[in-house]
Image: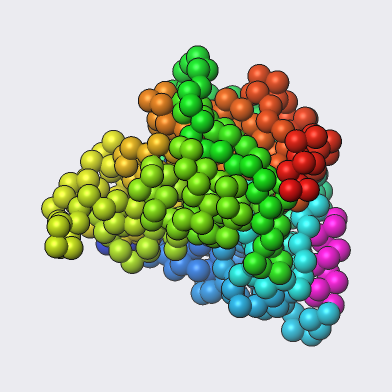
Amino acid sequence: MSQPPRLQLTQITKRYPGVVANDNVSLTVAPGTIHAVLGENGAGKSTLMKIIYGAVKPDDGAVLFNGKPVHIRNPQEARALGISMVFQHFSLFDTLTVAENVWLGLDKSLTLQEVSESISLKAREYGLDIDPARPVHSLSVGEMQRVEIIRALLTSPQLLILDEPTSVLTPQAVEKLFVVLRQLADEGCSILYISHKLHEIRALCHACTVMRGGQVTGVCDPREESNASLSRLMIGAEPPALQSRPYAPGAVVLEVAGLNLPSDDPFGTALQGMALQVRAGEVVGIAGVSGNGQSELLYALSGENPRAPAGSIRLGGQDVSRLGPGRRRKLGLHFVPEERLGRGAVPTLSLAQNLLLSRRDAIGPLGWLRLGVLKAQARDIIARYQVKANGPDAAAKSLSGGNLQKFIVGREIEAKPKLLIVSQPTWGVDVGASAQIRGEILALRDAGCAVLVVSEELDELFEICDRLHVIAKGRLSPSVMRADATVERIGAWMSGLWQPTEQEVAHAQA
């Protein structure tokens, strides 16, 4: 007898005030298959995954697991059935250690020591290095995602839901993870795979369900599709190609030299002999696996950490090493952090109110807020950057991740910066929105702005950068022109495999 589907959804509907997130969605996942769910930000993918995992209750429709009707009331019941999920936005307790967080979702007959040992074994097996004893609040976003992946794999799931699982991995580690996922599928585990990386879906998945506006618009075998055809299924068109442009850098805007900075976090990464320049009219990229000093470097550059040695950071020739974020902003530095909610935007405030985080032109001479100006500015950003939101009064937390990212990037670009520093500009953003954000970055560069991009997406860096560095273990590689950069070379450098130059040695000894 043939096996019943591992998962079968029939006419699932979920309504929220003003929007139907899922509209009669049906989906079938066979045992031992890797099934992609593809769609724009806001297409309803996350809501559907939360319904499967028991985090959201559907208004209508039926769910069958291994051929039997189920009513999954919470994630604990989902895990008991054999369903595990790795969310794009993590569900970890900051004050607990990695091991304690993982322990919460496992059989309590295991001791904490046994869980710690299991984490270390899985981490080595999958190349997802993590220390079980580290508190979660000390982890970078990428390291948190590794914890979520390991936690899910330790439950030996029958259905594993993965939301953007490769955004923190080197190309070599992605291939290793794919080997593991294929092995899991061969052993009978079904995998629901959500990713905006079309080449990953084509290389890994056996089937693909495409969603648009909360509805299923098609089902295909991605191995028989091209990136262009998948884009057309998802957004109705191919994203516009970025235009090649001449590279003619101007004066140095940002100069970092001799930046040695011990971490104030016992689990952080010390910066060693950092040196780089970013000129007007160029995009400089920094590649690397999360947790290698990116956060520490960004805090030092943005002014959140004003402990850098005097003279180590200059903006427009002026020493800003000890200046705070506000004073650096007045000099033309604007910053897009990787954490959208909490640092990039205040979740409960409206989009208009969130403009106040980095814009002061709507504050009157006596300190009164010019609310009409704020709303008009927010409305303009929503229109220009095609942000799907319920107007300027919509709370930041009500937007999908990709749409909130477009708003935050738009907010900083529209402030007319002299230097824009962007961390993970398109993390978890769909192909159409990614193309738009990258195009806006390049337009800003062509207008004479200096841009520094920190990203773990090599394809993104190769597409928009003029020069590249790699960060590994708190050190920065020499720069390489984009034309001379290869995936193999940058991937090797991401493991720290480059020889330090004489300049690096001199800076490290300074």
Q: Which of 276 and 480 lies nearest the eye of the viewer?
A: 276
Q: Picture coordinates of residue 239 (x, y %)?
A: 45, 26
Q: Tell me how the rendering is colored.
A: rainbow
Q: Picture coordinates of residue 337 (x, y %)?
A: 49, 52
Asked if residue 218 lies left or right of residue 145, the reply is left
Q: Is residue 185 magenta?
A: no
Quarter residue 419 falls in: top left
Asked if residue 341 lies left or right of residue 219, the reply is left
Q: Is residue 357 visible in the rendered structure shown here? A: yes
Label total for image: 0
Asked if residue 256 lies left or right of residue 216, the reply is right
Q: Residue at x 82, y 61 (%)?
A: 122
Q: Residue at x 80, y 34 (%)?
A: 502
Residue 465's place in the image compared with 179, above or below, is above
Q: Picture coordinates of residue 490 (x, y %)?
A: 73, 33
Residue 58's place in the image compared with 383, above or below, is below
Q: Which of 200 and 348 lies nearest the eye of the viewer?
A: 348
Q: Which of 371 and 67 lies nearest the eye of the viewer?
A: 371
Quarter residue 395 falls in: bottom left
Q: Residue at x 86, y 63 (%)?
A: 121
Q: Residue at x 37, y 39 (%)?
A: 417
Q: Which residue range is magenta in the image?
A: 114-125
Q: Main secondary structure of the magenta part?
A: helix
Q: Is residue 119 magenta?
A: yes
Q: Is residue 205 visible in the rendered structure shown here? A: no
Quarter residue 17 falls in: bottom left
Q: Picture coordinates of residue 347 (x, y %)?
A: 37, 64
